[in-house]
Amino acid sequence: MEKIAIIGAGNMGGAVALGLHRYAGEYPLTVTTAHAATLEKYTALGIGTSLDNAAAAAGADIVILGVKPWLVQPVLDEIAPALSGKLLLSLAAGIPSAQMAQWLAGTGVRAAYTVIPNLAAEIGESMTFATAVLGEEDRLVLSLFDKLGKTLIVDEKRLEAGMMVASCGTAFALRYARAAMEGGVQLGLYPREALAAVYQTMKGAVDLAAAHAAHPEAEIDRVTTPGGITIRGLNAMEEAGFTAAVVAGLKAYKN
């Protein structure tokens, strides 16, 4: 089984590390961070740890780069001698494949992908988008990240759309949850009651629509009684710009 090194186990890299540890334990795993204290939680779980990025990459077959976009080039320069024959998966958004290819020229890397999971990788519920590169390696990337949720291989021009809907989308969905919780409190629920109700309602709504393979509007119609309170609430949200605000948020990366 191929060995995996995650270079930079911060928020996203750490979520992938925890997910792989839980759901893909057959892959030997090593993670690196810039600070020893950060590694303690991984060591406690029995995950291999290191403060040496180059050494971790040298001992792996698959290198997952979990650093921030502005650190990708310096970290690649650091681990370049260890990349020959390795599969590189970068979790950094906004770096075109042409730029990656330029930085990786001469390294002998097996293949390089941009992979955009979300934080739910930690619990095996990520929606991950990855660029298409090679047939055989595409299948490996799919099989690996499908263990952490669902994965789509797309062309690069659709990768940013996937990032906004699925990765940034985690924050967008939770911002709705916060708003609904605040509304519940204003209506008289205690905060803990409102939070529990909102989370369970969101989960139930998504699971219901997914179970029926339904368009969201089909399930909305089932709960929207003519002249009832649901349609009043929906129309009030639309009058306040709900749909327009969501679409504007998804398109914000182009601004």
Image: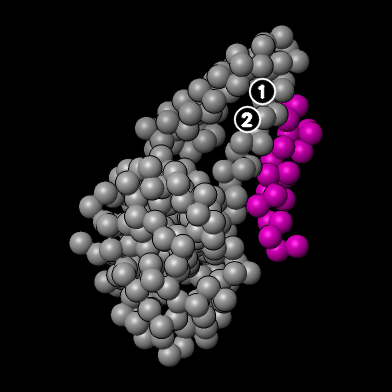
Q: Quadrant of residue 110?
A: bottom left
Q: Position of residue 200 (x, y in %)?
A: 50, 22
Q: Are marks 1 and 2 in contact (CB under 8 Å)?
A: yes
Query: The N terminus is located in which quarter?
Result: bottom left
Please state which amino acid type lies under the numbered disc 1: Met
* Element on which disc 2 rests: helix
Magenta run includes residue 198: no
Q: Determine whether, in the image, residue 96 is placed left or right of residue 141.
A: right
Residue 137 in sight from this viewpoint: yes
- Residue placed farthest to the right in the image? 240
**Residue visible at 41% across and 36% down?**
210
Residue at 32% over, 46% down: 46
Residue nearest the viewer, comparing 148 with 202: 148
Q: Percent position (x, y) of residue 137?
A: 30, 70
Q: Which residue is mark 1?
A: 181
**Residue 249 magenta-highlighted:** yes
Q: Give, as a single range, the part of the protein colored magenta.
A: 234-255
The residues bearing labels 1 and 2 have C-alpha atoms spaced at a distance of: 6 Å
Q: Secondary structure at mark 1?
A: helix
Answer above or below: position of 140 versus 241: below
Using residue 241 as the reference point, say whether residue 17 is left or right of it.
Answer: left
Where in the figure is residue 185, as x and y percent of width and height?
71, 16
Q: Which residue is mark 2?
A: 177
